[in-house]
Amino acid sequence: MSSTRRNSRSSDLLPDPVSSPAPVRTKRALFLLLLTTIFPGSAQWVSGKRALGGFVMRITMACWVLLLAVLALALFKRDWLLGLLARTSVQFAVSVLLVALAVGWLLMFLNTLAIIKPRYLAPGARIGLIATLLVLALGITGAMGYGAFVLNKGRQTIATVFSPGPAFKPVDGRYNIAVLGADAAGNREGVRTDSMSLLSVDAKTGKSLLISIPRNMQNAQFSKDSPMRKVYPEGYDCGDECLFNAIYRDATDNHSDLYPGVANPGAQATMEAIEGTTGLKVQAYVMIDMGGFAGFINAMGGVDVVSGGWVPYNAKYWPNSSVNTHWFAPGEHHFTGKQALWFARSRDFTTDYHRIARQQCLQQAMIKQFSPQTLLTRFTEVMDAGEELVETNIPQQQLGSFLNLADKARKTPFKRLTLGAPDFGSAGDKFSTYPNFDAIHTRIEDLIAAQSATKPAETSSPKASKPAKKSPADETPGTDSAPERNSEPGEIGTVASDAPTEQPDGSELTEKYLVTLEQIGATGTLEKIAANNNECSVP
C-alpha cells in the first residue's frame, strides 16, 4: 500500500496537498483550477493521472486547432465558412459536439475539485475556491449548452423555411430575388400580394437595386418560358381586373395545372411576370406575410427611419369623434413592428406610389440594421419570427453566400426604382396603366451599369415587351383604383405652394391640428400637407 502511494506521489508534479503549508495548498488549488479552465486535462496530467489527462488533453488540443481554423476561415474565407455553417447537417453535428464537450468539461471540473481536496484548505480559501469553480463550470458549460441550443434552433428554422436543393449561381454577375408582401387576413379570401419588388444584388460588391412594381400595374409581360405566356400571349391584359397583384391568385386558382410539382404556382407565376416586365432573370422569391411582419420587426428590436413628411395611419378613434386618423410627424422614428406596418401601408390622402417609396425605405432600413450583431443578440426571437414571416424557395445551401452578401449590401450604395411615379412621370401620367417596357428595360440596364461602372450593353436583356399602349389623348388623371381615400396630387413628393407649413396662429403643425382639419372636412389641405410623405431615408 505504501509503495503504491509513493509511486503515485512521484508522478504528481505538484506539492502534496496534505503535508504542504496552507498557503501552498491554496496556490496549488488555484493553479489546478486555472489549468482546467484554460486547457482541460492538464490538471489531471500534472497531478499524476497521466492516462486520463493525456486523453483529455488530446481532445482539447484538437478543439483549439479547430477553433483556430474557424477563426482563420472567418478572416480569409468567410463566405465558405458561412456556407458550411448554414448546412443543417453541420449545425446538428456541431450542436452534438458542443453538448458532449460541455458534459466533458463539467466532469473535468468535478474531477479537479476531487484532486484539490478542499477539506485540506483553510475555511476561507475553501469557500472562495468552490464558489469560483462553480461559477466557471456553470458559465463555460452553460455557454456551450446555449450554443448547442442556438444551432439546433437555427437548424429547425432553416429546415422549416428554406427548401432543399443545390445553390444557384448569379446571372450576369447578379442575384435577382422577387420580394412579395402577402396579405392573407381573415377578412380576405385567399392570399393577396399587396407589394411586389425585385431585389437585384451584385454578387461581388453587394451593391443593390430595389425595383418596386405598383400593384395596379397592367399588361404585365411574362417571361418567354412562362406557362402563363400561353394563356396571356399579349401580356396580362384582360381589362381593369388584370392588375399585377391579381397574378398570384389567378395562377393559384385557375392555372395551377400549368405548374405540376411546383409548391406555390402563384409565387412562380408572379416571379415570371416580374422577370418579363423587368428583363432580369428572377432566380427565387421571398414571400413576406404581413401578419408576421410586425413580429419580425419586434424581434429585431425595432427599426429606425427618417420620415420627410406627415404620414397618416388608422388607429383608435379620437375621443368624441368619428375620426380615427393618427399621424407620424416628420423626423427620425424608432418604430415598433406595428408602427412600421402602419408606416409602410399608409396611403390615406396620398397614392400607392407614396407608400411604395416608404416601403422601399423600410426595406433598406431593415437590410442596413439587420446586422450579425442583431442576429446573435436576438437570435431566438428572430428565428421564431422568421418561421411565421417568410416563405421562400431559396435553397438551404444558398444561405451561406447570401448571409455574406447581405453583410456587404448593408455597407454599399442602395438604389431604388419604381415602375411608375416618380421615376416614370407623375401619378397622373398613368405609366402603370400604359407601361413602356422598352423604357423600363433601358432604365434598369442604365442603373445596373452605373453600379458596375461599365457601359450598358446594347442588347443585354431580353425584350419581352410588345409596343406599349398609349394613353388616350383625352384621358384625364383619375383616382387610384383602391377604394380608400386617395388623391392624385401630381408629381409625388412635391409640396403644393399653398400647403400650410404652420397653423393659422403661427405655431408649428401638430397631430391635433391635422385631426381638426379632417374633422371639419379640409381633406384638400391634408392632401397638400401629406404630399411629400414619400420622402424617407435611413439614418
Image (tube, rainbow, N blue to C red):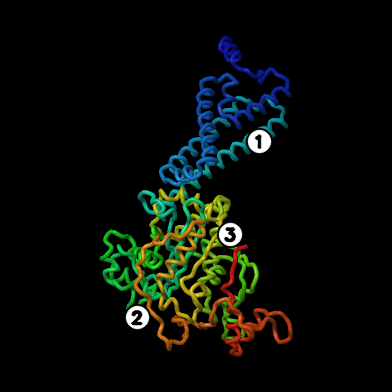
Q: Is residue 302 above or below residue 311?
A: above
Residue 53 versus residue 401: which sits nearer the camera? 401
Q: Which quadrant, please, contains the N terminus?
A: top right
Asked whether the viewer can see residue 300, the reply is: yes
| Residue at which label 3 appears | 301
Q: Nearer the viewer, mark 1 or mark 3?
A: 3
The reply to whether callout 2 and callout 1 are in contact (CB within 8 Å) is no
Q: Earlier in the sequence, mark 1 or mark 3?
A: 1
Q: Nearer the viewer, mark 3 or mark 2?
A: 2
x, y percentage for residue 152? Answer: 46, 47
x, y percentage for residue 474? Answer: 43, 89
Q: Nearer the viewer, mark 2 or mark 1?
A: 2
| Residue at which label 1 appears | 132
Q: Residues within 10 Å of mark 2 (few under 14, many from 20)?
A: few
Residue depicted at 46% across the width and 67% down the height: 443
| Residue at which label 2 appears | 239
Q: Secondary structure at mark 2?
A: loop
